[in-house]
Image: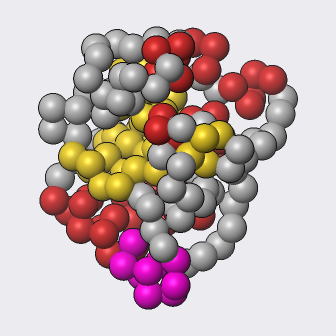
């Protein structure tokens, strides 16, 4: 089986993880941190706002079942990609919207989706950031599968069809 990983930051990682885990072809969704300057940061350090990390979900998927394009479309449909200061009630740099791309093809796909949304009148705040020299650090265990473990629904993420 050929498993690939994609990285999405769309506010609190609990809600992003929740929606990706439900998608056919996704083998796992892991909450973590990317984009900062500190190795293996803690949640408290990231929330302190001085590490530069975003809350990110690593989506491990089978590209024979679901494509990166489909993952990126879902990403834009489960959060507000126009919010510039966080996501919903979660305000701060760790909650910004970003796609961390692995290669030029992923970057081109993400940019094409952003262009479609801009043409529809959306003022997109989502950043595109290379994964080169940008490691993923897995978040603490209590963040993994949060909504499943607590039998709750996301409070600042919801699915809205825009494509």
Residue at left 39%, top 73%?
Answer: 113
Give the camera-side residue of 139 and 156: 156
Work out which quarter of the rendered image holds the N terminus and state it.
top left
Residue 46 rendering spot, x and y as whole percentages: 46, 22
Work out which quarter of the rendered image holds the C terminus and state it.
bottom right
Residue 57 rendering spot, x and y as whole percentages: 47, 37
Q: In this view, does 90 lie to the left or right of 109?
A: right
One can see residue 60 in this view? yes
Q: Is residue 163 left or right of residue 118?
A: right
One can see residue 24 in this view? no
Give the camera-side residue of 84 and 56: 84
Residue at left 54%, top 38%?
Answer: 92
1 to 43, vertically: above or below: below
Kindly report the secondary structure that dominates the magenta region of the rendered protein. helix
Name the image quarter holding residue 144. top right
Residue 160 lies within the magenta run: no
For the record, the magenta segment spans 114-122
79 to 82, vertically: above or below: above
């Amino acid at each position: 089986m050929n498993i690939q990983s994609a990285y999405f930051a769309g506010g609190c990682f609990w809600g992003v993880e929740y929606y990706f885990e439900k998608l056919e072809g996704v083998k796992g969704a892991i909450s973590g941190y990317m984009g900062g300057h500190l190795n293996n940061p803690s949640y408290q350090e990231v929330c302190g706002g001085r590490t530069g990390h975003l809350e990110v979900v690593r989506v491990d998927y089978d590209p024979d079942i679901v494509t990166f394009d489909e993952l990126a479309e879902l990403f834009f449909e489960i959060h507000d990609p126009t919010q510039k200061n966080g996501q919903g009630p979660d305000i701060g740099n760790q909650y910004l919207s970003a796609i961390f791309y692995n290669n030029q093809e992923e970057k081109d796909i993400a940019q094409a989706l952003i262009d479609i949304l801009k043409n529809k009148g959306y003022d997109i705040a989502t950043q595109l950031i290379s994964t080169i020299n940008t490691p993923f650090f897995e978040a603490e265990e209590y963040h993994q599968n949060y909504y499943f473990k607590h039998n709750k629904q996301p409070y600042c993420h919801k699915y809205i069809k825009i494509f």
